Amino acid sequence: MTADSQARMEVRPRLAPHVRLSFDARRQRWVVLAPERLLLPDETAVEVLRRCTGDVSLQDMTDDLAREFDASPEEILADVEALLRDLAEKGIIVA
Amino acid sequence: MSASLQPPLALLAEVTHRCPMRCVYCSNPLVLEPRSAELDTTTWCRVLDEAAALGCLHVHFSGGEPTARGDLPKLVAQASAAGLYVNLITSGVMLDAATLAPLVAAGLDHVQISFQDVDRMVGERIGGLKGAHARKLAAAALVTDAGLALTLNFVIHRHNADRVAEMIELGRSLQAGRIEVAHVQYYGWGLRNRASLLPTREQLDRVTAEVEAARQRLRGCLVIDYVIPDYWARLPKACMGGWGRRFMLIDPAGRALPCHAATTIPGISFDSVRDCSLNEIWARSPAFQRFRGTSWMPEPCASCERRELDWGGCRCQALALAGDAAATDPVCWKSPRHDALTVLAASESSMPEASFVYRGAPA
């Protein structure tokens, strides 16, 4: 593993300020509330977003999700990175 | 509520029509509600609780100028306690440190400040208020200093369409997380002043290219939402995400409306939150059912493959342009009136400058 990718695994993504992940009791699902925006994350995205606290490193997030979904860390990492990139572009998370 | 009817996503709380600005494209109705007709604090608090219970996730406080109401901090606190994500849509001209602090303490999440232009002279002519620009700049700085999320809203027309790059730059320098570049929608005062506001096709194309380039350049740093002027479009917008599907608007007097301009449509009576709960209105009010779904649609809409994408476009626009709120939105290329609309847009956008009609103040 290169120094760059090692540093990358230490990134601790967090929700952008003013973005809220909350459970909507009326619809019985998780929602992401942002300025004049609403996202309805799928099950995988919810699991990633719940770990975007600023305390969980990408490494830990990946290991944790690989165990939870019984998948290989490589596979999970690719999915998680794609998802985080998309969420960062939308201003939902900062990594 | 029937199984197929989804709850609304957001409540638009138009708490007053009072406003120190007189923007020539104001979306308020031509007849403004006087202060004496406004809902009181207690009723608004009940409405906010009912909105959250019904399933609303966001509340947008707007007007008029919402900060003209002295009880706004109380309403924000009520909304925040009910779990709503609280947005303030303001001109910014009445926002100073003393008015902002209680709103922040009450749980305000986000502020959208409208700017008429980056050019002070042009902006203040469009907004009809001298000194507004400097006050808006100061308000924007206060919002970010207070740690709130900030959106700048620019309404585009032919007098400012050539300065979109500078508008986006202003948003960057004021640390906005989001910018709305929204062409005038021609309802209310905008419809009245249409011939003095419509941009040319060439202006629209330049604005679109500018926004696209900025979106690429600022990806991940700044969210830019873009709304084009319908008159130059070939497909209608899904107005309000469909009639009675996502939004409920409460006007200053307490009438529940599916959209800002719904009261222009003759033959519809609107229920008041003074008499009914939001739940009853959403599920049973004839006004919300009038154009909900697809069963009201005429041809070519009824058999159109896009009928559940654009939900028939905009009813108020069909009324304004075709004289019939149930007609196919003339913006759609399938409407028999579409070609006439394109001719109208070309002709009005190239008219020499006319004087604006300004809204007055409500009593």
Image (cartoon, coloured by chain):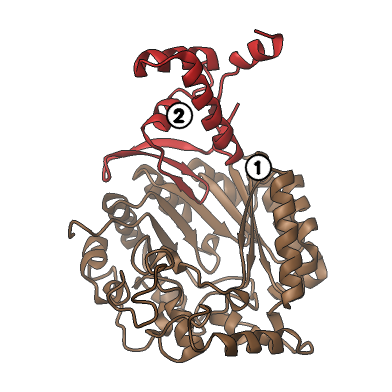
Chain colours: A red, B brown
Residues at discs 1 and 2 in contact (Cβ within 8 Å): no
* Residue B278 image-quadrant placement: bottom left
Mark 2 is surrounded, within 10 Å at the Cα level, by few (under 14), some (14 to 19) or many (20 or more) other residues, namely: many
Disc 1 marks which amino acid? Thr
Residue holding disc 2: A49
Q: What residue appears at the point 36 percent right and 19 percent down from the top-left corner?
A: A69
Q: What residue appears at the point 38 percent right and 49 percent down from the top-left corner?
A: B57
Q: Is residue A48 left or right of residue A86?
A: left
Residue A51 drawn at (x, y percent): 45, 22
Disc 2 marks which amino acid? Leu
Q: Chain of mark 1?
A: B
Q: Is residue B309 above or below residue B338?
A: above
Q: What residue appears at the point 58 percent right and 32 percent down from the top-left corner?
A: A85
Give the secondary structure at mark 1. Answer: helix
Q: Chain of mark 2?
A: A
Q: Is residue B220 above or below residue A9?
A: below
State whether residue A17 appears in this view: no
Residue B87 drawn at (x, y percent): 50, 52
Q: Do the residues at discs 1 and 2 belong to one chain?
A: no
Q: Is residue B118 left or right of residue B360?
A: right
In the image, B359 versus B102, the foreground residue is B359
State whether residue B221 appears in this view: yes
Numbered tag placed on residue B144 in the rendering: 1
